[in-house]
Structures are given as structure tokens and as C-alpha cells.
Image: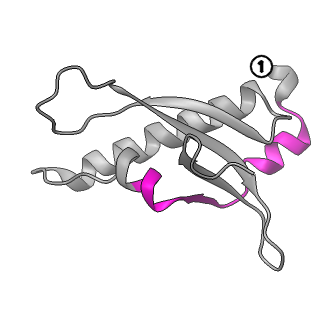
Amino acid sequence: MSDSLTPETLNTLRLPIVFTPGAWQRAVLLEQSDHAEKLQVDRLSHVLRAAFEAHLAFPHKPYVLFEVIHIEPTDRLDQDPLLQLSLSLLQEPGQPAALLIALAGEHQR
């Protein structure tokens, strides 16, 4: 992993991070909880850490998939507990570059 800590990789990790609405709702936002704020901060931290680890594992790929545990109230026991997300570099004309976290396949370029 130390080979991937180039100045370019470190600069990428300093970019702003944006979520698509779907990724935010499924990965971070909680419907109802007595401790929703703390749990959301914990989930956000977990998603960001997983995204950075995926980026560091494949620093030269423009689009990287990663997974986080998906905890959502449901009656279905057969639902996959992992949520697949993607991390990509978002470069729009006239806008600053940013890292985009999206649901897998939601925002491929």
C-alpha cells in the first residue's frame, strides 16, 4: 500500500467528496432511530474510510467499486447485507474536481 501513497494519490484524497442522492440515502441516512445523528456520523465515517481504502488499493483507476455493510430495517432475511458503492473522479466543466460516491452502476462514465 505504501507504493500507492504518491503525491498525486494524496492530492486526490484532498478533493471534496460528494454523494449521489441514492448513495446518501442508502449508505448514510437513517429512517428513524433514537441516536440517529451519532449513527449517521458513524456510517458516514465508515463509508468514507471504505472509499479511501478502495482508492488507495487502485489509485490509478478512474472508477473503483467498494462495499459497506448495509443496515436497513427490513422483514426480508434474504436481503444482501452488503451495499456496493463506487468512487470516481468527477470533473465537470467550470466546476472544481471532486470525488463522487454513488451506488454501483448509478453514475458510470
State the image coordinates of residue 36 (x, y, percent, origin top left).
20, 53
Residue type, label 1 = Met
* Image location of residue 97, percent across then percent down: 78, 64
Q: Quadrant of residue 81?
A: top left
Residue 10 or 56: which is nearer the viewer?
Answer: 56
- Looking at the image, which residue sits at the far bottom? 94
Residue 21 painted magenta:
yes
Left or right placement of residue 44 versus residue 17 in this view: left
Q: Which residue is mark 1?
A: 1
What is the count of numbered marks?
Answer: 1
Label 1: how many Cα within 10 Å (few below 14, some 14–19, many 20+): few
Name the residue: 78% across, 70% down. Answer: 92
47 versus 94 height, above or below: above
Label 1 SS: loop
Q: Is residue 29 left or right of residue 60?
A: left
The image quadrant of residue 63 is top right
Q: Nearer the viewer, residue 23 or 18?
A: 23
Q: Which residue is located at x 89 percent, y 35 percent?
A: 6
Q: Quadrant of the N terminus?
A: top right
Q: Is residue 74 above or below residue 39?
A: above
Q: Tell me where residue 27 sits by quadrant.
A: top left
Q: Is residue 80 magenta?
A: no
What colouring does the structure picture have?
one colour
Q: Residue at x 57, y 30 (%)?
A: 66
Residue at the location (89% across, 44% down)? 8
Q: The magenta stretch spans which residues?
A: 5-24
From this view, report whether residue 106 is shown above or below residue 78.
below
Where residue 29 appears, as percent x and y from the top left, is: 31, 54
